[in-house]
Amino acid sequence: MEATPPDRPWAEIVAAGDGGGRLDAWLAERLSGLSRMRVKGLIEAGRVLVGGRVVKAGHRVREGERVEVAIPPAPREGLVPEDVALTIVFEDDDVLVVDKPAGMVTHPGAGRLVGTLAAAALAHAPGMAGIGSPRRPGIVHRLDKGTSGLIVLAKTQAAYDGLTAQLARRTVSRRYLCLAQGAVGRAEGVVDAAIGRDPRSRVRMAVVRDSKGKRAVTRFRVLERFGRGPNAVTFLECSLETGRTHQIRVHLASLGHPLLGDETYRGRGGGPIGDATLTALIDGLDGVALHAAALAFLHPVTGTPMHFSCPLPDRIARVLSHLRNTSR
């Protein structure tokens, strides 16, 4: 087995006149080749010490402080296969449809380099190497880490080209089931609102002016409602006409109905109160109460209509069962 290259140490004393700025900005100016987001990731991973202790990215550096960084080696250009079990819904020579569990990242990114769906799929089907990008072989669309459900991967270049073309034409059908906080008033509706990066947070998306983001369209339909007031919860079916980052999460939160378990968009103090069992079930979601339950597309090589569905995972089904039992 090839040995892993060691970390590269770096250290510097904050000079006179350089104090007062944020640690991540101060470091980004001095560590050539590393973006501010990459630097922030190193800080959050505990690879940066100030005065011998771990601090946050927003720490204001002071004159005389010693800043030390353990810089990991650059990731390989290609993806290393990982023997991780997959729940395969369908497979042929061209496509692979998988039921992704919550907690698994679709492809390597700033926050996760190992244990990804892409690496597991590459171990299962080594021929996917080189399909798409080296770090995202076979990946034509994605699901958030905290979202479970159906995702299709391309095993051949012809399948990759065909699937990406269908996604661009918005002819791939994706249906989601989710549990949202509050009582959604309308039985069904459409949210047509542009989504872009939240100017207040690098990890959040937000509804923005059309000129600041990309058009995003989500259709929703109420399936069941539970409870009243601050403890109300709505079971919804959502379908995407576009595929923006965090789209369903952002659109429902913009209506005042963030998804259960969504720490990013629910705001301070969000979530049902007074029901300890429900709180525990939400804490045990290992993600957000969002599941990609159905997927349909034309086979990218044969043109045959393909339709797939998968049931709610236990993590969400348990919450739904509790809500039904306590709402009788």
Image (cartoon, rainbow, N blue to C red):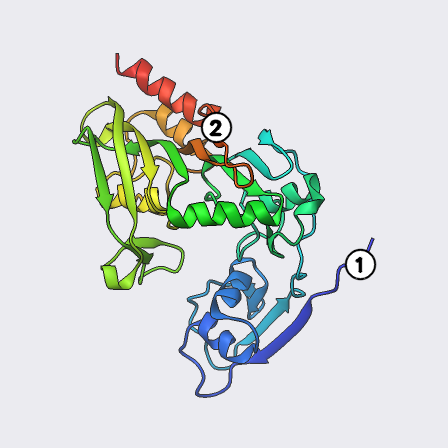
Question: Which residue bears the numbered disc 2?
Answer: 308
Q: How many marks?
A: 2
272, above or below 217, in the image: above
Work out whether residue 138 can be spotted: no
| Side of 256 relative to 281 (left or right) | left
- Given residues 118 and 298, the one toward you in this image is 298
Which residue is at a point 53% across and 50% down the rendered structure image? 161
Work out whether residue 316 can be spotted: yes
Instruction: State which quarter of the image contains the C terminus.
Output: top left
Which residue is at a point 43% across and 46% down the rendered structure image? 167
Mark 1: few, some, or many residues within 10 Å (few <14, many ≥20)?
few
Q: Position of residue 183 (x, y in %)?
A: 20, 30
Which residue is at a point 53% across and 54% down the rendered structure image? 111
Callout 2 secondary element: strand
CA distance separating discs 1 and 2 = 42 Å
Identify the image quadrant of residue 175.
Answer: top left
Mark 2: few, some, or many residues within 10 Å (few <14, many ≥20)?
some
Tell me, for residue 78, which label it has, or none: none
Q: Position of residue 308 (x, y in %)?
A: 48, 28
Question: Which residue bears the numbered disc 1?
Answer: 3
Identify the image quadrant of residue 232.
Answer: top left
303, above or below 40, in the image: above
Identify the image quadrant of residue 195.
Answer: bottom left
Q: Residue flagged by tag 2: what amino acid is it?
A: Phe
Residues at discs 1 and 2 in contact (Cβ within 8 Å): no
